[in-house]
Amino acid sequence: MVSTDRFFKVLISVLYFIIVIISAINMWSISQKLEEPDIFYKHIFSLGLSIFSFVSGLIISNFRLRGLLFIFSVVLFIVSFILSIHTKVAGLEVFGARRWITIFGITFQPTEILKVASTISSAYFIALRREKFALIFILAVLNVLPAFFIAAQPDVGSASVFFVIFVLLLLISKVPLRFIFLFFVLLFLMLPVVWKYGFKDYHRKRIQAFLNPESEYLSHGYQTLQAKIAISGGGLMGMGFAKGEHSKGKWLPNLHSDLAFVSVAEDFGFIGVIISLIFVFGFIFSLFFKAVFSDYRLSRIICTLTGGVISFHVLINLLMITGLFPVVGIPFTIISFAGTHNISVSFLVGICAGISRVRPKGIEQSEF
């Protein structure tokens, strides 16, 4: 049992650091092409904080500190939820959305911290095996309620992540399928209201650009169009490190953030993309495999949720840059220049790597 725990700890850790290295190399290339070295330095700093966060999660996943982790996650949820509400009023507005807040000179996204707090708190409540209706109510408070506040910022991308977490939680907790079906019916019925009052004009334009690219290719469809041109320009082997002509021409807005993986395709081509994705999906599957082979309920839940959150970010980002999904501002985990997101997810990954897959001695079946 111990050797299996060590195997997963090493596997998850090694794959995590490989992706961090890929991210650093890619951001170096982007900074060279855009002639903005500060992008690379800032990204390296945030990756350093992400590694620190990963190690912190690894340490706190120790059994003796696990009770502290639950208390910490609940307090963090309350604080980050209050900050998320404050962001709507006094946050920094970028591209029409208020997602960032500055405290003591540090700018960050409270919603990303809220994801971590919600994930850990929800995992603990499910592990405690509360009565089903009470559990659904608690999970809704921890995930659906924040989603509506975040959507009002408006940050549709982050709000959608909370809905994904909520559905995963319902499946994990073995809630009757009729409740899950009812949840989707309610979401469907709310779409007209969300379209009219929840979306801003640029949200609607992005969806229209996705449905009819030719009509908006010079405005809201421009970003996706340029991404596809850059990806196709990479060909099989790519143009070489920091030699992507389309990126150098600065045709790609926000290349370092949501479109960061486009640079991998342009520089290293189809071969580079496949190799990178092998590591990325190997990393994701290692989290799911640990969940599958875990006898310890809390370990199984946290690994499943973390794998689900990362999968959603990676898949939606890939669909966005290839024009198969509307642009909703979801970063590619670790690869993108997304400091708060990367730091927050790294903490969850550290917990997944360190937590035992078997129930620790002294913990009864009814406890976690």
Image (cartoon, rainbow, N blue to C red):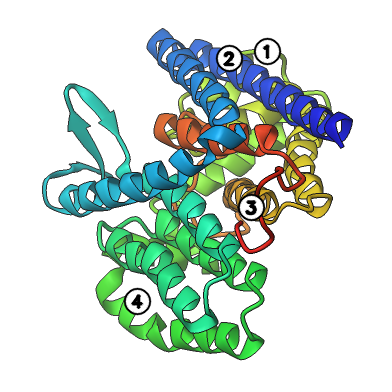
Q: How many other residues sit within 10 Å of disc 3, few (<14), some (14-19) or many (≥20)?
A: many
Mark with earlier residue (3, 1)? 1
Q: Could you tell me how far apart the alpha carbons at marks 3 and 1 are, in whole angstroms? A: 43 Å
Q: Which residue in the protein does label 4 denote? A: 195
- Front residue of 333/202: it is 333
Q: Could you tell me how far apart the alpha carbons at marks 2 and 3 are, in whole angstroms? A: 40 Å
Q: Which residue in the protein does label 1 denote? A: 241
Percent across and percent down for residue 346 are 55, 32
| Labelled pair 3, 1 in contact (Cβ < 8 Å) | no
Q: Which residue in the protein does label 2 denote? A: 29
Element type at marker 1?
loop
Element type at marker 4?
helix
Front label number (3 vs 1): 3
Front label number (4 vs 1): 4
Amino acid beneath label 1 = Phe
Percent across and percent down for residue 329 are 44, 48
- Front residue of 225/207: it is 207
Q: Which residue in the protein does label 3 denote? A: 298
Report whether residue 285 is seen: yes
Element type at marker 2?
helix
Q: Could you tell me how far apart the alpha carbons at marks 2 and 1 are, in whole angstroms? A: 6 Å
Amino acid beneath label 3 = Leu
How many badges with numbers are in the image? 4
Q: Which mark is residue 190?
A: none
Q: Could you tell me how far apart the alpha carbons at marks 4 and 1 are, in whole angstroms? A: 42 Å
Q: Could you tell me how far apart the alpha carbons at marks 4 and 3 are, in whole angstroms? A: 37 Å
Q: Quadrant of the C terminus?
A: bottom right
